[in-house]
């Protein structure tokens, strides 16, 4: 109990994060003393001088020793320094558990074994360690002295999927049942533990107290039987999944036939995976081991003989008030109810070095936490960020080693960064940035051994950079990072400098750029339904980017097969310029299931210098940068002159539900909410996490808040969403015939066109003007054109009488824009006769390097892969191009693999119709019978550019089969999708779709155009009360009626 109270007192003193460095005297040098075992330590004057303490300080000043910021008593006689020190028992690790008390009673720390003490000299009065002399005891002898022996088992880390099982969901903070423990045993195993009790006095009357601690190692309730010294115990130990269980047993000395304690455990055969391990056994038994250091407990006041001149006895050894007991007449007087530890010799520290604490800057607003091995590049990064072009920040560069010393009392622990950030920001976090410049390690098995690789730590396993500052900003939720945070997963200076070059390149270029409005959405999945759900996840957020402040164009890539990994080539899209790449699917640190590949290999074809996208990956462990992997995400970020500028990804498992919530909030705040759209990427991440605070009770949401890692500079503002940027160029002004069948000279009227680009914010309510000045026969005519805001391109046009034109000048009056330098252009015409011979001038006003887009529809529904179609339905192939296109049959090539065939054959077309100047409709000549088909359609524009091939495999059946109705996700809370697959030679004649409650009342009726094959209908659930409902679909076929019902649970 005393140990527990002392520990809690220490712990709560450490929770005051910003106070962890108050004990430091920055004007003085300190001896950093490292020890690895409990004991009384001694340093003489010559040693102190050897390690760097000045002789004048030793002669005129007084020593002061600190541990965990608390001054420790010392004995100093002017020549010899003595103090009692305890090894590192991992108390600071408790600050990473939830709750703090969830850390089991252990002496095995997570990060380092050594305890650190700091010794300095000044004029303050010494905190003296004076031996205590107890009053004389009434009884002589060694009876009623209880030895204490502790055995801890540290063979395995309990949450390690390479050797055991994990909880269904693993949080980043340390949880109950998580930590070092013994090897697990399973159903058919008897676990036996034999412990020698040195100098056990079996003749004593005192009972033996045994306490052991078990650790659940599987996601089942645990049922454990046990026996002690061959005697089965009557009680069954019952405890929950992945939890600790402590049991105390009292035995009489007669329970022992020798000096051994033998405990056996075995699981009852209740559940198959009832796995358990032993973490600790503590035995208190009568007797002393006089041959080595030992700890004991006194049941009554006693006087014991001192056994050697060099021996030292410490009283209250487990408390912060431990004190040496002085001897009287060659014996020690002991007090009832206290713990003592007997040391046969004084010890020398493991290591000693002189150091001086570096006084840190508290006025900065951009913090770089790095490692001493990366200081050169970190300082160069700081120089850029402090420059005008880099944002003019006040930058502070600190090393993790310095933070451990100043803000974690010399111990290696991520708590140091949290303490530092609170101290440095002093409650004001607005607009401040934290760049973690260095690789971190989170895997517990290697935390101690890989200290040279753990350059800048993260919190927990799985790793979380959010938790490095969560809870410090009282204006935000306790699970939200207090400061905008990003990380560079680097180990070398060159990697930092390569990334910095990309940052400079992006930030020196105009923020408004047309390529940033190009998005790619990629979705994977293991099954057909999952592929559909994940593609729908990205489809749900697309309107924010398309219709919101950016006005983006999104190209979607959906996994076509259920193979584990499907490769896809997006090099051409990346090289042309993408502002955002978002992925939802499965993955690992090295591959995603719709696999775009690494960026760095030349053979992958990526070459997007100056056009670096922001990337978001949903997929288990895609963002696991905290182990030995060479992650895909880091490769995209750090590869020089190509790749990405920032990457969001999960450090561990990810889930569709929490991903949907995060992405919805992320896209909404970045592309639709003007109050947050202009934030830096790190600030945006903070705001998105804050928006999820009311649903963090869902553990999956909470884990996503903690485990989504931003790789990259958190200060980057990437998307041009603050204001528009209208642009006009000479090449965007053109003249055309009013009648395109005749050259300009034969027309009575001319069309004047101006193509305007907007590379900035899309605000359709905004009204702007363009002045078009036409010079003809040395006279000028002014025309004012009013236009509303548009997303990317708009064409202004006017019609005038045909007259020779010498010059057309265009000036945009757009108001507040990113730049007005691109708001004027003019087209000068030197040869009007040449113009008159054409139908438009100049030729190729907009360079046509982009191929058309083709679609194949049956019954006005796009053919999907591996689905049934209506063989008797209307067939239409559509070709769309950005430029006018002539209605010719040769603009489309259709190829088909028919049932029983293995190669493509070209199919003829019945007709072609021009629906608009930019869209053609073709009717193929395909007669469909039962079987499996593969169609391949290629389109061509006027300049010979070919489309991306439309390839689909589809099926045809000659009789109706039972339809299949599914709903996903189910249960649902915001939106669910009903999926209906029908197989028939014709579409249903009529259909009705209704949602019923448990009382049979209709809640909603839906209009659903159902055809043959796969049909999907979005069901919005936000207005439906939680409960159980039934979706009923009735289909009227020519041969009868079919009714399908599916249960839907609304959360």
Image: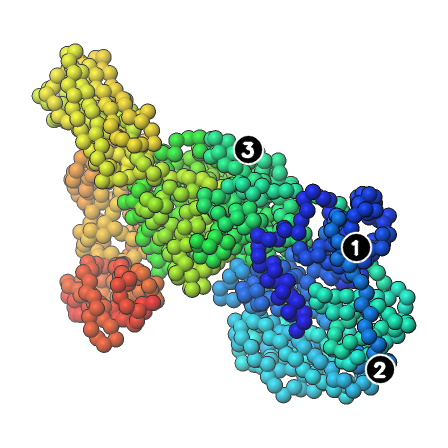
Indicate whether 1013 appears above or below 135.
above
514 vs 437, nearest the viewer: 437
- Using the rendered view, name the quadrant where residue 879 is placed: top left
Residue 97 located left or right of residue 752 = right
- Label 3: which residue? 383
SS for callout 1: loop
Q: Is residue 765 above or below residue 617?
A: above
Does residue 767 appear anywhere in the picture? Answer: yes
Q: Earlier in the sequence, mark 1 or mark 2?
A: 2
Q: Residues within 10 Å of mark 2 (few under 14, many from 20)?
A: few
Q: Earlier in the sequence, mark 3 or mark 1?
A: 1
Q: CA distance from mark 1 to mark 2?
A: 38 Å
According to the image, label 2 marks what residue? 139
Image coordinates of residue 726 in percent, x first then y, are: 29, 31
The circle on residue 349 is: 1
Quarter the N terminus occupies: bottom right
Name the mark nearer the viewer: 1 or 2: 2
Q: Residue at x 38, y 39 (%)?
A: 719
Residue at 31% across, 46% down: 672
Find numbered disc 3 in the image and state the secondary structure of the residue it sits on.
helix
Q: As drawn, which residue projects farthest toward the left? A: 748
Element type at marker 2?
A: loop
């Amino acid at each position: 109990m005393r140990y527990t109270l002392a520990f809690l007192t220490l712990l709560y003193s450490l929770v005051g994060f910003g106070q962890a460095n108050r004990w430091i005297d920055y004007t003085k040098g300190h001896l950093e003393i490292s020890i690895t075992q409990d004991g009384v330590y001694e340093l003489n004057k010559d040693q102190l001088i050897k390690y760097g303490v000045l002789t004048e300080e030793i002669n005129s000043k007084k020593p002061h020793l600190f541990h965990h910021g608390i001054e420790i008593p010392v004995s100093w006689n002017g020549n010899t320094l003595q103090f009692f020190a305890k090894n590192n028992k991992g108390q600071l690790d408790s600050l990473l558990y939830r709750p703090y008390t969830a850390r089991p009673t252990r002496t095995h720390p997570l990060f380092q074994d050594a305890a650190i003490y700091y010794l300095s000299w000044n004029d303050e009065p010494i905190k003296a360690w004076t031996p205590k002399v107890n009053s004389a005891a009434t009884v002589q002898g060694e009876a009623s002295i209880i030895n204490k022996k502790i055995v801890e088992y540290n063979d395995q880390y309990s949450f390690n999927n390479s050797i055991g099982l994990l909880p269904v969901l693993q949080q980043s903070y340390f949880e109950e049942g998580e930590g070092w423990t013994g090897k697990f045993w399973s159903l058919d195993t008897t676990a036996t533990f034999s412990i020698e009790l040195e100098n056990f006095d079996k003749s004593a009357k005192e009972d033996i107290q045994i306490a052991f601690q078990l650790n659940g190692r599987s996601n089942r309730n645990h049922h454990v039987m046990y026996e002690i010294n061959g005697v089965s115990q009557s009680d069954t130990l019952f405890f929950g999944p992945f939890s600790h269980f402590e049991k105390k047993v009292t035995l009489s000395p007669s329970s022992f036939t020798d000096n051994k304690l033998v405990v056996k455990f075995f699981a009852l055969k209740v559940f198959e995976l009832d796995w358990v391990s032993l973490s600790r056994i503590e035995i208190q038994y009568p007797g002393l081991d006089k041959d080595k250091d030992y700890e004991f407990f006194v049941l009554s006041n006693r006087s014991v003989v001192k056994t050697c001149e060099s021996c030292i006895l410490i009283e209250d050894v487990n408390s912060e008030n431990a004190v040496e007991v002085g001897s009287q007449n060659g014996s020690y007087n002991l007090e009832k109810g206290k713990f003592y530890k007997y040391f046969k010799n004084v010890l020398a520290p493991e290591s000693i070095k002189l150091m001086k604490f570096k006084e840190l800057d508290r006025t900065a607003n951009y913090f770089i936490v790095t490692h001493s091995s990366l200081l050169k590049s970190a300082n160069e990064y700081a120089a850029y960020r402090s420059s005008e072009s880099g944002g003019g920040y006040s930058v502070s560069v600190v090393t993790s080693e310095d933070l451990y010393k100043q803000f974690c009392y010399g111990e290696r622990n991520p708590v140091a960064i949290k303490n530092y950030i609170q101290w440095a920001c002093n409650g004001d976090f607005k607009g401040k940035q934290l760049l973690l410049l260095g690789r971190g390690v989170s895997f517990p098995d290697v935390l101690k051994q890989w200290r040279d690789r753990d350059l800048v730590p993260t919190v927990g396993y799985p790793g979380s950079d959010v938790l490095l500052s969560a809870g410090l900003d009282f204006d935000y939720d306790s699970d939200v990072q207090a400061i905008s945070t990003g990380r560079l997963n680097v180990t070398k200076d060159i990697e930092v400098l390569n990334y910095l070059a990309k940052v400079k390149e992006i930030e020196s270029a105009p923020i408004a750029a047309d390529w940033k409005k190009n998005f790619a959405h990629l979705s994977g999945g293991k099954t057909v339904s999952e592929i559909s759900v994940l593609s729908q996840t990205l489809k749900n957020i697309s309107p924010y980017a398309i219709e919101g402040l950016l006005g983006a164009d999104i190209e979607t890539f959906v996994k076509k097969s259920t193979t584990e990994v499907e490769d896809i080539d997006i090099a051409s899209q990346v090289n042309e310029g993408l502002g955002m790449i978002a992925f939802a699917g499965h993955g690992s640190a090295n591959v995603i299931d719709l696999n775009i590949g690494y960026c760095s290999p030349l053979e992958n074809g990526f070459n997007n210098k100056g056009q670096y996208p922001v990337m978001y990956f949903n997929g288990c462990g895609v963002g696991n940068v905290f182990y030995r992997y060479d992650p895909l995400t880091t490769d995209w970020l750090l590869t020089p002159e190509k790749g990405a500028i920032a990457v969001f990804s999960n450090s561990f498992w990810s889930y569709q539900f929490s991903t949907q919530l995060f992405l919805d909030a992320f896209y909404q705040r970045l592309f639709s909410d003007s109050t947050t759209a202009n934030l830096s990427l790190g600030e945006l991440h903070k705001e998105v996490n804050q928006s999820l605070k009311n649903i963090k009770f869902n553990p999956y949401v909470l884990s996503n808040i903690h485990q989504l890692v931003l790789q990259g500079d958190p200060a980057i503002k990437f998307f041009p969403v603050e204001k528009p940027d209208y642009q006009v160029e000479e090449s965007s002004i053109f003249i055309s015939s009013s009648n395109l069948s005749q050259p300009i000279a034969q027309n009575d009227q001319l069309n004047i066109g101006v193509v305007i680009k907007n590379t900035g914010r899309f605000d359709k309510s905004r009204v702007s003007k363009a002045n078009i000045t036409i010079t003809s026969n040395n006279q000028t005519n002014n025309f004012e054109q009013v236009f509303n805001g548009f997303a990317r391109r708009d064409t202004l046009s006017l019609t005038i009488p045909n007259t020779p034109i010498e010059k057309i000048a265009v000036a945009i009056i757009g108001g507040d824009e990113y730049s007005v330098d691109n708001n004027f252009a003019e087209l000068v015409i030197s040869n009007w006769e040449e113009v008159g011979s054409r139908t438009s001038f100049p030729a190729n006003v907009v360079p046509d390097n982009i191929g058309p887009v083709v679609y194949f529809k049956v019954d006005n529904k796009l053919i999907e892969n591996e689905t049934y179609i209506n063989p008797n339905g209307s067939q239409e192939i559509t070709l769309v191009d950005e430029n006018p296109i002539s209605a010719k049959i040769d603009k489309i090539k259709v190829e088909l693999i028919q049932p029983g065939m293995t190669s493509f054959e070209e199919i003829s077309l019945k007709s072609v119709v021009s629906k608009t100047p930019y869209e053609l409709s073709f009717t193929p000549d395909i007669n469909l019978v039962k079987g499996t088909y593969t169609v391949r359609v290629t389109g061509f524009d006027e300049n010979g550019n070919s489309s991306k091939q439309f390839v689909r495999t589809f099926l045809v059946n000659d009789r109706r089969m039972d339809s299949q109705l599914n709903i996903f996700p189910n249960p649902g809370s915001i939106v669910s999708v009903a999926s209906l697959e029908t197989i028939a030679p014709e579409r249903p004649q009529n259909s009705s779709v209704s949602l019923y409650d448990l009382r049979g009342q209709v809640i909603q009726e839906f209009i659903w155009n159902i055809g043959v094959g796969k049909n999907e209908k979005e069901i919005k659930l936000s207005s439906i009360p939680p409960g159980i409902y039934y979706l009923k679909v009735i289909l009227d076929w020519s041969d009868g009626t079919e009714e399908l019902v599916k249960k839907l649970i609304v959360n």
